[in-house]
Image: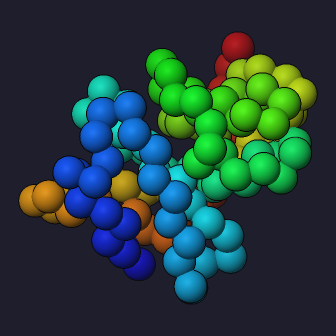
């Protein structure tokens, strides 16, 4: 089920937007990295901290609590202390609207190193 999260104008390049859908289990964070939009689960798999407060750089979102960094494409951490992934969600853009399929959240297989 795709839900409008925000408009493109509300999420400029390098921006992070937290969305807490009533019908989803947990909050989702949507990021604009180089004009591409990504959505992952909002809670760090290590410290249970909001990733929406994190630092976005090179398609990675870093948790400000302990410094774990999550790949926006895979959900997997590239930097410890986190060792488990966060869910990734399907994103699409229709006109000026950014939509996320809030039921699509999956934990992807760990990519080859």
Residue 32 is left or right of residue 46, and the answer is: left
Indicate the quadrant where residue 90 lies: bottom left
- In this view, the residue in front, 90 or 22, is 22
Residue depicted at 14% across the width and 58% down the height: 96
Q: Is residue 52 visible?
A: yes
Most distant residue in the top direction: 113
Residue depicted at 31% across the width and 63% down the height: 6
Which part of the image, by quadrant, shows the C terminus?
top right
Give the x, y percent position of residue 33: 37, 31
- In this view, the residue in front, 103 or 13, is 13
Residue 110 is left or right of residue 54, and the answer is: right
Give the x, y percent position of residue 58: 48, 19
Q: Is residue 36 above or below residue 67?
A: below
Q: Is residue 55 above or below residue 41?
A: above
- In this view, the residue in front, 36 or 1, is 36
- In this view, the residue in front, 24 or 111, is 24
Count of marks placed on residues: 0
Q: Is residue 70 visible?
A: no
């Amino acid at each position: 089920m795709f839900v409008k999260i925000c408009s493109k104008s509300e999420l400029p390049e390098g921006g992070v937007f937290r969305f807490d859908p009533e019908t989803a289990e947990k909050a989702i964070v949507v990021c604009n990295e180089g004009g591409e939009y990504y959505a992952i689960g909002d809670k760090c798999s290590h410290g249970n901290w909001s990733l929406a407060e994190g630092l976005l750089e090179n398609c990675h979102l870093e948790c400000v609590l302990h410094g774990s960094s999550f790949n926006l494409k895979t959900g997997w951490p590239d930097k410890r202390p986190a060792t488990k992934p966060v869910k990734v969600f399907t994103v699409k853009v229709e006109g000026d609207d950014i939509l996320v399929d809030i039921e699509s959240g999956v934990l992807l297989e760990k990519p080859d190193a």
